[in-house]
Image: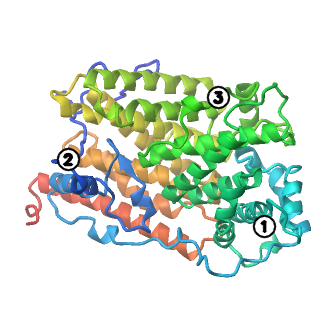
Amino acid sequence: MQNPRSATGASIITSPVPTTESGAAQKPATLPEPSGEGPGVQSTLQSRAGPGNVILNNLAYFRGHYVFSEQGQRWIEAQVGERNVFDKLLSLELPWPQLPDSSAPLPELPHRSDVEMLIVVYTSSPESLVFPVVSRSIFKDTLDLAYNPAQPAGSASAKACVYAFLSLVSLFGFECSILGTMDCRSYASAAQSFLTAVIQQMTLDGLQSLIMLVQLQYFVGDLQSAATTLSIATRFLYTLGAHVPPTSPLAYDKRNRECHLRDLFWLCYSFDKDICLRTGQPPCMNDTHCDLTLPPDYVRLRDRNLQPNTPQRYEHTTPLFPWDLCLSMLKSQVHQDLYTAHSLKKPAPELLSSIRNLDEKLDGWRVSLPAAFRPALYFFPATPVSADLKTITVMLRLAYYHCVTVIHQASSRCDRAGPIPAGIASSTRLSIAASRSTLWYLERVLPLVHGECFRIILFYAITAVLTLFCNIISDLHDSDTVENINLLQNVPRLIRSIPVRNRTLGEVIHLQYLDGLTTELGSICVRAISRSQGDAPGADA
């Protein structure tokens, strides 16, 4: 495969990259334009997957058109010469995102001393640096309210917070006998039952409960629910003043309410910018309404905390957050410049300028990271991997490749405005290279990743698969097609090797479903190539 970047790492989007020996440039894969106006057209752009099929419902491609929408399916059928290729897969429902019956009795709260022990365990763990959703000292006030038999004002929000916390520690797999047979969904359902009171009271406890529910919904892949819950949490942030830093500079101290509120703001911000890129929907938080000043000395402390075996001082250690905050801010700009309603109408030269600018900023972020865990421009099967990688560094690399894909997929819109501008093929191939890097990297690092992250891993894997799939069928004669198909056909084995702690029935069904999906995508590509070469019967009627 030819290198679509310059030696300095900058994107080459000023001249086409040859994709065959003759030097012909590859035409990027595109979804068809809507043919009319009105509700009927909009419905063709929405996913045809059932409501329980959150993986397919949340996957957007190019202009925000869902790959599995009617519009997307018609394009796929035209490319591969088959009809109704996804009917069986689209009809499947995944049971695990569904929460238990809300009318069921609430589970009893564990003894307070048991919850206090869990708080100590969680706030002393690496997870608390990535998801600093609770403060050990501040949570004592939460427990005072939740366990007060008089049920004073704010007690409902406090109980919701405790239930949400129990859901979170159950999800992350903190072994403790006090959780008994209850799972994270049961505790999450209990927390959600207090939602009306939480909204009315608008307290710090309520905000914490909402953010922990966002985490749960995000980790199980239900991004639409996560976005909805996050929109409510955003109003709490503004009401509680968390969207601006403390009025007087403070040394970071998790025991300080203002510092803790600011952590909650950055958590919401990080989730918001990631979810909007995944779903193609607008973010909940407008950057212009927030003060995005980084925590004091953030970059230096981030680099220190990412190092393996770094001693931690949890009450005074600046958190890492789910992704680097600088990357989250760049994600926000990617959506703003490439995927808003206004940016979708940009003429080709302006769009290419935006892509070039974002690509340079992303590479600037990449090289700003310490070399020990800096993402390589590309990852190949022979690329060395450190045995001391933390899960957060794995996620940073996957997020980097995903951002490359999202940025350069936008170039596929250019051919709708007339002749394909020079450089589009290069941008297209960058998205393919990032997808290949994602799959090769996952194959190497899966043994190092915590099992509770498996659904996030699945998102990156499936997004890479769909990018390869759409580009394969858009140009079946491309010089890299055979290698890309081989990589695609290896994904089912990759999915089967994803570590999952104490797999539930729903998780087993989920993995089996994605195994079938990726297997079928590879088979569709093989059949399409056979048809294009005249080795198989013609397209179905």
* Residue 389 % position (x, y): 67, 43
Do labels 2 and 3 touch, CB within 8 Å?
no
Per the model, the C-alpha gap separating discs 1 and 2 is: 51 Å
- Which residue: 46% across, 52% down? 461
Q: Which residue is mark 2?
A: 34
User: What number is the disc on residue 5?
Assistant: none
Kind of residue at badge 2 = Pro
Kind of residue at badge 1 = Glu
Mark 1 or mark 2: name the one nearer the start of the chain.
2
Q: Quadrant of residue 409?
A: top left
Per the model, the C-alpha gap separating discs 2 and 3 is: 39 Å
Quadrant in which the C terminus is drawn: bottom left
- Which residue: 25% across, 55% down? 39
* Residue 323 % position (x, y): 62, 40
Q: Which residue is mark 3?
A: 291
Q: Of discs 1 and 2, which sits in the foreground?
A: 2
Classify mark 3: helix, strand or loop.
loop
Mark 2 or mark 3: name the one nearer the start of the chain.
2
Mark 1 or mark 3: name the one nearer the start of the chain.
1
Kind of residue at badge 3 = Asp
Q: Which residue is mark 1?
A: 175
